[in-house]
Image: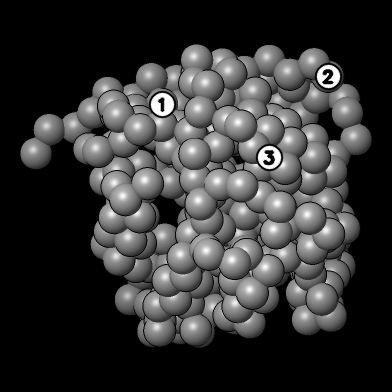
């Protein structure tokens, strides 16, 4: 099996952030936006598979990984504009945009800001508005972040996958602790990202989005329960919905074959 070349590039934003981005493969452009962790690395294995059929673009979000923070106040619109700036720097006018979890909120916002640039929108384990459960969950995680960043990282993993899968893939737990947001900079970036997702409400004009939409989820997601995907689907007449029985919240990692097959088939039908 041959591997595609991965090209890394930098994206400069108006407020002084430098975003570290990657592109690989050829064909229909597909922008991958990760969730609360904000890393391009989340998509590494998915990108390796999908780059056989598509041109994949992914990036470290501002203040995370190799990307710098910049000066602008962080909200969902700023993060969405960063995503569009990555497409600009990659020389791409139009793309399919796939956002997972918080990345789905960013993708929805980007679709509202620049619908003419999005050929298709894939919302994976995402939501329309937080509601009481998500507000309580992420509010508690924000408090834990301030008290103990290692516990914050542990809970992110323990709630993100099926227990049996974690038991068989314990390295994800060790990796999460190693990447725990222990510095004040890392905690500040994560706090403002949590605040941005808690403030997000896409319900006002979601039905006006003109592009095709695919909604992905699992029935055993303990972070963003499946009723959030059902709410999205109800608000988007004509969308496609693909709900797996198992996989947990981070099913692109735990169920990569099913995830990539579903994504590739849907994009192929556009």
Badge 3: how crowded within 10 Å, few (<14), some, or many (20+)? many
Please report whichever mark, 2 or 1, sits nearer to the chain's N-terminal start.
Answer: 2
Q: Nearer the viewer, residue 158 or 171?
A: 158
- Say which residue label 3 marks: 110
- Say which residue label 1 marks: 23
Identify the residue at horizontal 51%, vertical 52% (top origin).
212
Q: Is residue 203 visible?
A: yes
Q: Is residue 186 visible?
A: no
Q: CA distance from mark 3 to mark 1?
A: 19 Å
Identify the residue at horizontal 68%, vertical 33% (top origin).
114
Q: Say above or below: 203 vs 52.
A: below
Secondary element under disc 3, as helix, strand or loop, is: helix
Badge 2: how crowded within 10 Å, few (<14), some, or many (20+)? few
Mark 2 and mark 3 in contact? Answer it, CB < 8 Å.
Answer: no
Secondary element under disc 1, as helix, strand or loop, is: strand
Question: Residue 24's spot in the image, x, y percent?
Answer: 34, 28
């Amino acid at each position: 099996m041959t591997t595609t070349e991965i090209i890394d590039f930098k994206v400069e934003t108006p407020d002084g952030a430098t975003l570290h981005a990657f592109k690989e493969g050829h064909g229909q452009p597909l922008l991958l936006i990760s969730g609360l962790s904000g890393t391009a690395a989340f998509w590494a294995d998915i990108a390796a598979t999908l780059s056989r059929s598509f041109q994949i673009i992914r990036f470290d979000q501002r203040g995370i990984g190799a990307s710098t923070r910049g000066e602008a106040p962080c909200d969902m619109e700023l993060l969405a504009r960063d995503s569009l700036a990555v497409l600009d720097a990659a020389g791409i006018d139009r793309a399919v945009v796939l956002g997972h979890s918080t990345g789905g909120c960013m993708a929805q916002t980007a679709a509202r800001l620049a619908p003419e640039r999005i050929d298709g929108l894939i919302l994976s384990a995402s939501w329309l508005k937080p509601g009481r459960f998500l507000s309580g969950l992420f509010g508690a995680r924000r408090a834990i972040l301030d008290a103990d960043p290692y516990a914050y990282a542990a809970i992110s993993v323990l709630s993100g996958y099926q227990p049996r899968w974690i038991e068989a893939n314990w390295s994800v737990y060790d990796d999460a602790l190693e990447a725990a947001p222990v510095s004040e900079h890392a905690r500040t970036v994560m706090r403002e990202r949590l605040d941005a997702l808690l403030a997000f409400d896409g319900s006002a004009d979601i039905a006006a989005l003109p592009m095709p939409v695919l909604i992905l989820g699992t029935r055993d997601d303990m972070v963003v329960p499946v009723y959030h995907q059902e709410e999205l689907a109800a608000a988007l007449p004509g969308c496609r919905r693909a709900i797996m029985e198992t996989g947990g919240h981070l099913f692109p990692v735990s169920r990569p074959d099913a995830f990539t097959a579903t994504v590739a088939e849907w994009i192929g039908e556009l």
